[in-house]
Image (spheres, rainbow, N blue to C red):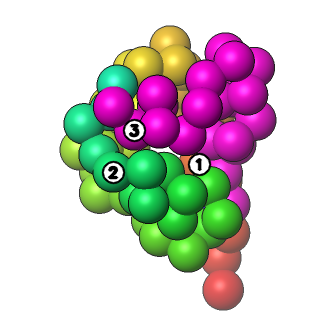
Amino acid sequence: MKNRLRELREEKGLTQEELARALGVTRQTVIAIEKGRYDPSLRLAFRIARFFGAKIEDIFIYEEG
């Protein structure tokens, strides 16, 4: 699944560490999500969307196949 996490994080001027702290996850989790190596749980996806004031589908792009 693709996502816009890095783009949104950089727009807010946040480091990966700062975002991780705000979301209650590790920096490694943020890195893995940004690189598309890890799909967050639904709970974390909602937390991310709420943090950025966006809808989940505005951040995470589901691609079939």
Amino acid at dot 2: Thr
Q: From what the image shows, is residue 54 above or below residue 40? A: above
Give the Cα distance between marks 3 and 2. 5 Å
Of residues 42 and 33, the one drawn nearer to the viewer in this rendering: 33
The image quadrant of residue 65 is: bottom right
State the residue position of label 2.
26
Residue 30 pos. (x, y %):
48, 51
The answer to whether one can see residue 33 in this image is no
Residue drawn at the location 46% of the way across and 31% of the way down: 19
SS assignment at label 1? strand
Which residue is denoted by mark 1 in the rendering? 60
In the displayed structure image, the side of residue 50 where residue 58 appears, left or right: right
Task: Please indicate whether residue 4 sits to the left or right of residue 17 in the image.
Answer: right
Q: What stretch is highlighted in magenta?
A: 2-21
Sequence-first tag of 3 and 2: 3
Observer-nearest of 51 and 20: 20
The 10 Å Cα crowd at callout 1, few under 14, some 14 to 19, many 20 or more, is some
Query: Could you tell me which secondary element the residue under label 3 belongs to?
Result: helix
Q: Residue 20 carries which label?
A: 3
The structure residue drawn at horizontal position 25% and vertical position 36%, both measured from the top left corner, is 24
User: Residue 3: image x %, image y %?
Assistant: 66, 51
Q: Does the magenta stretch include residue 53?
A: no
Q: Would you say 50 lies left or right of 53 here?
A: left
Left or right: residue 37 versus residue 51 is right
Check residue 39 in the rendering and tell me which mark sits there, or answer none: none
**Mark-to-mark CA distance, 1 and 3:** 17 Å
Of circles 1 and 3, which is in front? Answer: 3
Circles 1 and 2, Cβ within 8 Å, touching? The answer is no
Q: Which amino acid does label 3 sit on?
A: Ala
